Image (spheres, grey):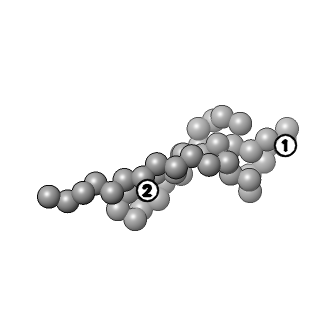
Amino acid sequence: MESLDIRFNYFLRTTHKNSDGKHPIVLRIIYRAERRDVFTGTL
């Protein structure tokens, strides 16, 4: 039986900034060494 090895990380993406100078909060999902970034819509 294999382990699922799935990780969830929340972080502040400082390289992206909106017109108000705020940075988005991003959810990064890592599963089997494959990354997906999901923008939460929260600033």
Residue 33 sits in which quadrant? Answer: bottom left
Residue 19 sits in which quadrant? Answer: top right
Q: Is residue 40 above or below residue 11?
A: above
Residue 13's disc number: none
Q: Where is the N terminus found, in terms of image quarters? A: bottom left
Mark 1 lies on residue: 21
What amino acid is at disc 2?
Answer: Ile
Q: Where is the C terminus found, in terms of image quarters? A: top right
Tell me how many marks there are. Answer: 2
Q: Secondary structure beneath disc 1? A: loop
Pinpoint residue 7: horizontal percent, then vertical percent.
42, 52
Residue at mark 2 to residue at mark 1: CA–CA distance? 28 Å
Mark 2 lies on residue: 30
Q: Is residue 25 above or below residue 35?
A: above
Residue at 78% x, 48% y is 17
Pinpoint residue 25: horizontal percent, then vertical percent.
64, 42
Residue at 85% x, 38% y is 20
Between 10 and 38, the one nearer to me in the picture: 10
Residue at 57% x, 46% y is 10
Q: Earlier in the sequence, mark 2 or mark 1?
A: 1
Q: Is residue 5 left or right of residue 21?
A: left
Q: Is residue 5 left or right of residue 13?
A: left
